[in-house]
Amino acid sequence: MPGDGIQKNVMPDKPRLSREQIAQRAAQELTDGAYVNLGWGIPNLMGEYLPKGITVYFHSENGILGMGRRARPGEEDFDQVDAMKVPVTLIPGASFFHQADAHLMTRGGHLDVAVLGGFQVSEKGDLANWKIPGAKGSGGIGGAMDIAAGAKTLIVCMEHTTKDGAPKIVKQCTYPLTGLACVDTIVTDVAVIDVNPEGLVLREVAPGWTAEEVQNVTGAPLIAKERIPDMTLG
């Protein structure tokens, strides 16, 4: 599909998926029996939206394997929290271990999937997700570098553009990098995009959106077939 930049004055005034809906769509990428690390933000919501009939072992780098959904009011146990310090539930067979062992899992290639948030993703699958230039503070790389490098598959969940309309999917990242050529799939509030050797492949669009409209809010060329299906949440 032609086009390699965003035109801020042509942003479609159309509904976009909510953060919860992005998490719900991303959960459909997971398979039965997978070991999955969830990053902060949108990925951390995915435990609520697993497709029926599958078991996923969510991993937290603070030392849990087998997290369930977030705890609801009255269920909280503050000795049982995820990496964001949010109380979580457990699935049968869950285990606890030292944080060092949790990071050995990420670095040793034992995670089937990692789902991280992002500030920018390049057309080659480079990820920047820990520091926005000019923002206050030093940023927080945390364990994201190890997770991005160690997971067999990396999914990024994020809004498609910044609040001022700038693209977050770009030809080349301008923010400090988390990892090079590590992203496999991007799930945003307007599209599902796969990072392939030939480029960014537009797989799905949000209901009511066209491939051309998604291209207009993307800072790198998209490869699109003749008909792109809508994103489904069920």
Image: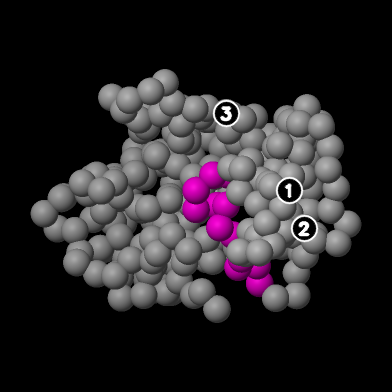
Q: In this view, does 110 lie to the left or right of 165?
A: right
Residue highlighted by disc 1? 80
Residue at horizontal 25 percent and vertical 48 percent from the top? 163
Disc 3 crowd, CA 10 A, few/some/many (<14, 14-19, 20+): few
Q: What residue type is labelled 3?
A: Gly
Height in image: 107 above or below 75?
Answer: above
Residue highlighted by disc 3? 142
Hey, which residue is sitting farthest top in the picture?
138
Residue highlighted by disc 2? 90
Residue at horizontal 54 percent and vertical 44 percent from the top? 40
* Residue 15 visible, this angle: yes
- Residue 132, percent from left and from top: 35, 30
Mark 3 or mark 1, which has the lower sequence index?
Answer: 1
Task: State how far apart marks 1 and 2 are (Cα).
Answer: 9 Å
- Say if the magenta span includes residue 39: yes
User: Who is closer to the viewer here, 92 or 224?
Assistant: 92
Q: What residue type is labelled 2?
A: Leu
